[in-house]
Image (cartoon, rainbow, N blue to C red):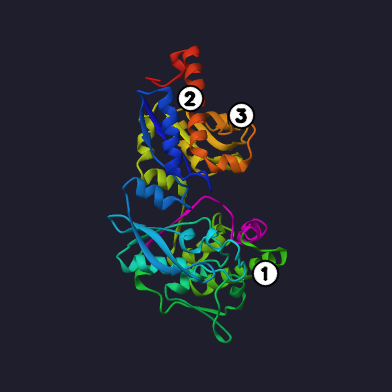
Amino acid sequence: MLILIAPDSFKSSATAAEAAIALAAGAHRVLPDADVALYPMADGGEGTIAALTTSGAVRVAEVAVTDAIGRPRTARYGMDSVGTAIIEVAEASGLPHVAGHLAPLTASTWGTGLVIADALAHGAREILLCLGGSATTDGGAGILRALGARALGANGEVDDGGAALAHIGQIDLAGLLPAARLARWRLACDVDNPLTGENGAAAVFGPQKGAGPADVAKLDAALGHWARLLNRDVGPLDEASPGVGAAGGTPAALIAAFDAELVPGARLVADAIGLTARIPEADLLITGEGSFDSQSLDGKVVGTLAQLASGAGVPVLVVAGAAKAGRETAARAGIVGARSIADGPRALAELMAKPAPLIEAAAADMLATFAAGLAAQGPELGRPGL
């Protein structure tokens, strides 16, 4: 019997690798002779480098850059054997690094651009940029500038940050790194927000980055101006296109300048680590995340894996910090069981402090119930060997 263990991280509590180990321990409690294979997952945002590194697919490099508000920081990126650089926006320009010092109007992706420049200098021929967890709303302008472009206003170079986009009058690409133009660009994304408007980068994600209502209005207008400049000076961009509003609108500059392609992040990771190819062989797939809700089924790890497994006729179990999705919603996605790690009334802080034993126990309990149900209802309901 083959059980695939493929969780996302339990945010701020357990990494995907830690969660996978705990789930596997729970599975072995119930089925000690099962072949259990671990595939820690990510959705193309934070944790993607770790997921690919765990699979042995990439080596990790470090580079000195700056964070979203200009302070020195060291960022990691991955490089595989064929020259694909795996870079997370959150490594340099992430929200956790500036907690307590949020700067919604001036935060910049400049540091992420420095990571990309280093990867290109070390031979990267493809940039896989993982969007998610950014502290910025600058439309990718910082990245473009770090790669050699200039944002010019009435008095010369314009400052970094989303609000400053409104003061740019011209984008000059004369100094853009040739390697950036030659590279293939893919942007791993798990949201479908447009660049501007009520569902855009500023309106939806700005508040979590410290933007108040007046800031959101200012940033939204600035991003609209930036989109018009990109179309005029750089390349075609549809600001209403799904996903362009991810990571503070970072895709906008990269689509216009490099014809970057937006790709579903979770599927990309599953393919890269060999999980997609393994699913049809499996008898069961166990996944998990911090909060299992309706959004989990819309491009996130759990929903993506449920879709892949359902297509192969493989049942899926979900263990989560909180299981909020309704039973019917889960069943429609091919998920046959889902439960929280809470084993009774517990404070959230308590659940997050030591999640591994709770994840293990929840997996064992759910798998025991699932296996008993199959035994009672007949072998025809299971996969061969289950």
- Residue bearing mark 2: 367
Q: Residue at x 58, y 65 (%)?
A: 137
Q: State the mark number for residue 328.
A: 3
What range of the chain is rendered magenta? 184-208
Tell me if 15 is positioned left or right of 81 in this view.
right
Residue 64: x %, y % from top left: 40, 68
Q: Residue at x 67, y 69 (%)?
A: 218
Label 1 vs label 2: CA separation? 51 Å
> What amino acid is labelled 1 in the image?
Lys
**View extreme (left): residue:** 81
Tell me if 55 is positioned left or right of 163 in this view.
left
Whether residues under marks 1 and 2 lie with C-beta atoms below 8 angstroms apart, the answer is no
Q: For the residue labelled by badge 2, is the local secondary structure a helix, a strand or a loop?
A: helix
Residue 100: x %, y % from top left: 61, 63
Residue 257, placed above or below residue 361 = below
Q: Residue at x 52, y 61 (%)?
A: 97
